[in-house]
């Protein structure tokens, strides 16, 4: 039995692609055991055990963005994390990392121990942990073609796309009648009027305070305009009161149904979110999170270029802006919906899983 260690944490954007690959491996090989490395504080502590995988944890040691007391302590915390990672990686046949601050210590441990390392970069712009690991990884994989422009190890990286949950990916191949059946069931379940167009708003698994505030301020206007609003407020935020046409949800367990039931998506520009919007052929307004290295703008660039999305900067996304632009967005969403057709793609989880199996076949048990 070969032991594969999947590494990623902090946000669903790092964890869900890893779980999609783990699920494919377990379903397609009886010779593979999958385990996971994260921290005690990320969303992996909920998602990984729920998926039936063993979760190992190491010390959280994010790279400081400014020089302060935490920056002085960081080398010590990072060294501890590497030591913990060495114990976990030692009995592993292959490590596959999906980024996040938990990944760098595991990459270094794999390098020290000579363990096969595969890295998957989910964002259009690589994060620092994957930039580090890519220098000595056995295989680098990317979700966005534009990542190759960063040169070095990324120039020769293999384009595999984004590993998505099977229920999300399945939408891309559904017929109109199959989509219509899901649409009807979801509207009945949520108590919505199917004759009205529906806006699906979410800011990620934890929600987005700025987006939530704008929707709250625009809600009366949107409902008066005849829209339904499905609003994923995030598990860390208080749940607003539901009303006719407005369904607030603390956490969305079935994203596939919500995509099918919506006409317009409003969301952040996380890599997984953009890949999901692309796979389900939705039209979206992307409001990029205004931190980091600008990766959320870059993640949405392909959607914008093909006419499947528009971008509104976070600072401009106010109730006045939304109220003034909602009719135009709805028209563009209607136009996109009318011309979209089922697509046939090989799931990225399958592509990555096949690469993993090819690597471990040459590793002695």
Image: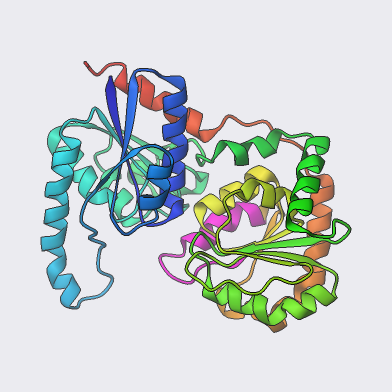
Tell me: residue 277, above or below residue 173: below
User: Which image quadrant is residue 136 in?
Assistant: top left
| Residue drawn at 31 percent across, 16 percent down | 361
- Image quadrant for the C terminus? top left
Q: Position of residue 328 (x, y in %)?
A: 81, 68
Residue located 82% across and 42% down the image: 180
Residue located 28% across and 22% down the image: 2
Q: Answer with the quarter of the image where residue 268 lies.
A: bottom right
Return the residue nearer the eye: 152 or 132: 132
In the rendered image, the quadrant that contains the N terminus is top left
Relative placement, left or right, of 126 versus 277 is left
Question: Which residues are drawn in magenta?
Answer: 286-304
The reply, left or right, for residue 274 in relation to residue 349 is right
Residue 262, percent across and down? 74, 55
The picture places residue 290, in percent across and down from the top left corner, at 48, 72
Residue 298 in sight from this viewpoint: yes
From where the camera sits, is residue 121 visible?
no
Task: Answer above or below: position of 214 versus 263.
Answer: below
Lateral position of residue 205 relative to residue 265, left or right: left
Q: Give the percent coordinates (x, y) of residue 145.
A: 51, 44
Please tell me how many numbered marks the rendered image carries.
0
């Amino acid at each position: 039995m070969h032991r594969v260690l999947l590494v990623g944490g902090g946000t669903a954007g790092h964890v869900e692609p890893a779980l999609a690959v783990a699920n494919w491996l377990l379903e397609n090989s009886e010779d593979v055991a999958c385990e996971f490395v994260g921290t005690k504080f990320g969303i992996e502590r909920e998602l990984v055990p729920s998926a039936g995988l063993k979760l190992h944890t190491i010390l959280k040691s994010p790279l400081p963005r400014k020089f302060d007391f935490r920056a002085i302590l960081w080398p010590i915390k990072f060294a501890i994390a590497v030591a913990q990672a060495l114990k976990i990686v030692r009995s592993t046949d292959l490590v596959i990392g999906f980024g996040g601050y938990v990944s760098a210590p595991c990459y270094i441990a794999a390098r020290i121990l000579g363990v096969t390392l595969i890295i998957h970069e989910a964002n259009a712009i690589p994060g620092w942990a994957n930039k580090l690991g890519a220098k000595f990884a056995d295989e680098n994989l990317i979700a966005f073609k534009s990542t190759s422009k960063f040169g070095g190890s990324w120039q020769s990286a293999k384009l595999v796309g984004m590993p998505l949950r099977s229920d999300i990916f399945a939408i891309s191949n559904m017929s109109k009648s199959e989509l219509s059946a899901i649409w009807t069931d979801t509207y009945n379940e949520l108590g919505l009027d199917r004759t009205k167009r529906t806006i699906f708003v979410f800011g990620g698994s934890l929600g987005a305070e700025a987006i939530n505030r704008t929707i709250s301020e625009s809600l009366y206007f949107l409902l008066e305009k005849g829209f339904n609003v499905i609003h994923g407020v995030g598990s860390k935020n208080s749940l607003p009161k539901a009303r006719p046409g407005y369904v607030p949800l603390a956490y969305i367990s079935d994203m596939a149904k919500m995509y099918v039931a919506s006409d317009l998506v409003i969301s952040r520009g996380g890599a997984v979110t953009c890949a999901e919007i692309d796979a389900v052929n939705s039209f979206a307004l992307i409001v990029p999170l205004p931190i980091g290295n600008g990766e959320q703008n870059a993640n949405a660039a392909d959607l914008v270029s093909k006419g499947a999305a528009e971008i509104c900067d976070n600072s401009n996304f106010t109730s006045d802006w939304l109220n003034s632009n909602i009719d135009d967005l709805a028209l563009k969403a209607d136009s996109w919906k009318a011309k979209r057709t089922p697509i046939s793609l090989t799931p990225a989880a399958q592509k990555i899983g096949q690469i993993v199996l090819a690597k471990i076949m040459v590793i002695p048990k």
